Image (cartoon, rainbow, N blue to C red):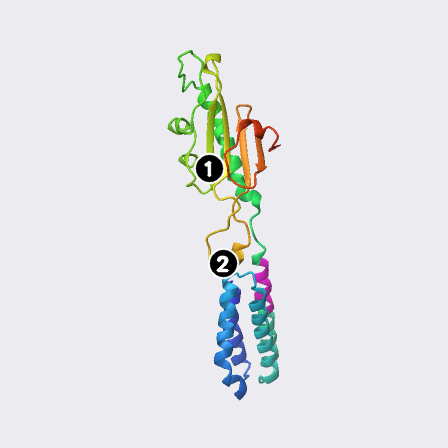
Amino acid sequence: MLSIILLFPVVIVGFIFAGARLNDKEKKWLPVRMIVLGISALLTAAGTALAIIPLLILLWYGVRRGAQAMARGQGLKRFAIGCGVILFTLFAVANYLASTNNWPSESQYAAPGAEGVRNIVAAEMGFRSEGKLDANKNGVPEYGSLQQLYQAGLIEAGSLSATGRSDYRFTVVLTGDPARDEKEFFVYATPVHYGSSRRTLSLLDAFRPHSARTTFAADESGVIRRADLGGSRDVTRQETLNWEKLIY
C-alpha cells in the first residue's frame, strides 16, 4: 500500500520537474479530480473487493501524467522523468496486486490446533508415567484433566482456554473404568471462530477466511486425526475413528 500512497508525490513532483503545466480546463476540474483520486486511494487502501476499479483510476492517473510530462515538459529531461513516472505507476499497481494474493493458507491457521493436540497427548503420557494421579488408590496411574496437566507444568495456560493466539479450543475427556485399573483419554481441538474473517476495515478481508476450519482429535494411542466438520461442535471418540490420520 505504501507504493500506492507514494504514487501521488511521485507524479506531482515528476510533473513539475519535467517543466509541464496544467491547462485551464485541467485547473478548473482539479478539485474534482483530487476528490476522485482521494476516494480511489481510500477504497484501494481499504482493500475493497471492487478495488480493481479505483486501482484502474490510479493507473490511468499515473500513466496519463507521465505521458503529459513527456509531451508538455521542457528539454530532454522530460522523457526520462515521464518514463520514470509511468514505470513507478506500473510498479505501484503491480506491487499492490501482488500483496493482495499473499495470504496465509488454511493449513497455517490450523497448525496450532494440531500442535496443541500433540502437546496434550505427550503431556498425558508424561502425567501417567510419572504417577501424578491415582484416584482409586490401586497403584495404577491415571490420565489427567487439562487443569491437572497445567498444574503439573506439562502444558501452557493457553491450552486451558480459547484466549491464546491459536484460536483453538482444547477439550480433554477422561473415560474408562477405574475398576479395570486403567483409564482412557480423548482430546480434541475445535476452531473458536470457524472460517471467520478478521475484524478489519478491509472489505477484501471480509471475503477471505482467516481462521481454521479443521478439527483435530487424538486418544491414548497417540494417533492424531483431522476433519472439516463444517463448523465447531463437540465430537466423540467413535466418530473420529473415520477421520483422516495426520502424518508428520
Magenta span dominant secondary structure: helix
Among numbered discs 2 and 1, the one appearing first in the sequence: 1
Give the CA distance from mark 2 to mark 1.
27 Å
Q: Quadrant of residue 148?
A: top left
Q: Quadrant of residue 15?
A: bottom right
Picture coordinates of residue 243 (x, y %)? 60, 32
Q: Is residue 223 visible from the viewing direction of this image?
A: no
Q: Quadrant of the C terminus?
A: top right
The residue to which callout 2 is attached is 202
The residue to which callout 1 is attached is 169
Q: Is residue 95 magenta?
A: yes
Q: Is residue 150 above or below residue 47?
A: above
Q: Quadrant of residue 228?
A: top right
Q: Is residue 140 left or right of residue 98?
A: left
Q: Is residue 98 visible from the viewing direction of this image?
A: yes
Residue numbers of the magenta segment: 90-98
The three-letter amino acid code for the residue at tag 2 is: Ser
Q: How many marks do you count on the picture?
A: 2
Picture coordinates of residue 205 (x, y %)? 52, 55
